[in-house]
Amino acid sequence: MSLFSTPFDPTRDTALVTGAGNGIGRAIALGLVGEGVRTVFADVSAERVRAAIGASERPGLAVPWVGNLASLDACDELLTSAHSALGEVTHFVHSASPPRREADHLLAVDRKTWQEMHAVNLDAGFHLARELAKRLIAAKRPGSFLFLTSLHAGTPRNLAHYSTAKAAMAMLVKELAKTLGRYDIRVNALVPGAVAAGGFVADPALARHIPLGRLGEAGDLAPMALTVLSNKLSAYVTGAAFVVDGGLSLTNWFEAPVLD
């Protein structure tokens, strides 16, 4: 039997994916459903959730949820809904993030935009992961969590609210991995490059900075994501960050912002 033929166990594995309505989150959620994993598609947009589930090969395995994860009350509602639909959630992907605008540079970003970026990325990620882990520990079940961070967790992006949120997430992954490993819960990060999806409006000219010569697509991330999530394929991997960027991290193409 091929090592890659059954990366998940549909009789035991379930998943929750935030930001599943578009971009990388959608690609990962669709990939999980394609492998037979019952999956909650969580997103702030009902229209995007419907479209994502409609694009699935096996829509009967997809569970929709709509809400804004900037609110911890909404996070609790998501947990309640996910556990009601799936029982224990063994696989968690945190891809949700507010859209980012180039105009929100260091001297322009307002308090609401700053707080929402950190609330959705960091606060929701921490709260959801911790509560899911508590239930898995109580049930003595293994788990696998994956956070979508960014190249800009370590490189300035001219968007301080975004870069600092992603940098904090990168450390959160390590903290969770170190604490939860003894309970057989693995926690890793996926680090996208310039992917034309989600909140990133890709400039085609950026391709000249990418060694592989093109912008990324959401589908480029899904195979690596599913491999890292799989307790069969990546059983001895935790606290790691997997860069999928076409080689973009070999350069730093951002200039200092124009402040006007």
Image: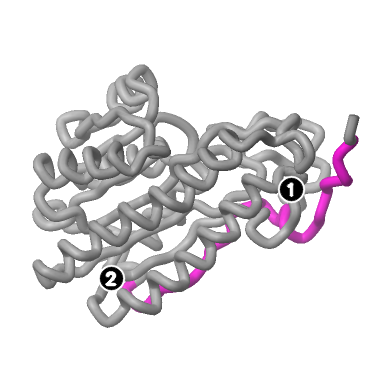
Residue type at mark 2 is Ile
Q: Is residue 168 left or right of residue 125?
A: right
- Prevalent SS, magenta region: loop
User: How many numbered marks appear?
Assistant: 2
Farthest residue toward the front? 111
Residue at mark 2 to residue at mark 1: CA–CA distance: 32 Å
Q: Is residue 112 above or below residue 159?
A: above
Q: Nearer the viewer, mark 2 or mark 1?
A: 1
Q: Secondary structure at mark 2?
A: strand
Q: Is residue 101 magenta?
A: no
Q: Residue 157 got which mark?
A: 1
- Assign the N terminus to one quadrant of the image: bottom left
Hey, which quadrant is residue 135 in on the image? bottom left
Q: Which residues are magenta?
A: 235-258
Q: Is residue 23 above or below residue 134?
A: above
Instruction: Work out whether mark 2 precedes mark 1 in sequence or the reverse, and give the earlier one.
Output: 1
Residue type at mark 1 is Arg
Q: Residue 185 got which mark?
A: 2
Q: Is residue 204 above or below residue 84?
A: above
Q: Secondary structure at mark 1?
A: loop
Q: Residue at x 13, y 55 (%)?
A: 88
Q: Is residue 13 left or right of residue 16?
A: left
Farthest residue toward the top? 47
Hey, which quadrant is residue 4 in on the image? bottom left
Q: Residue at x 58, y 50 (%)?
A: 192
Q: Is residue 243 magenta?
A: yes
Q: Residue at x 60, y 59 (%)?
A: 167
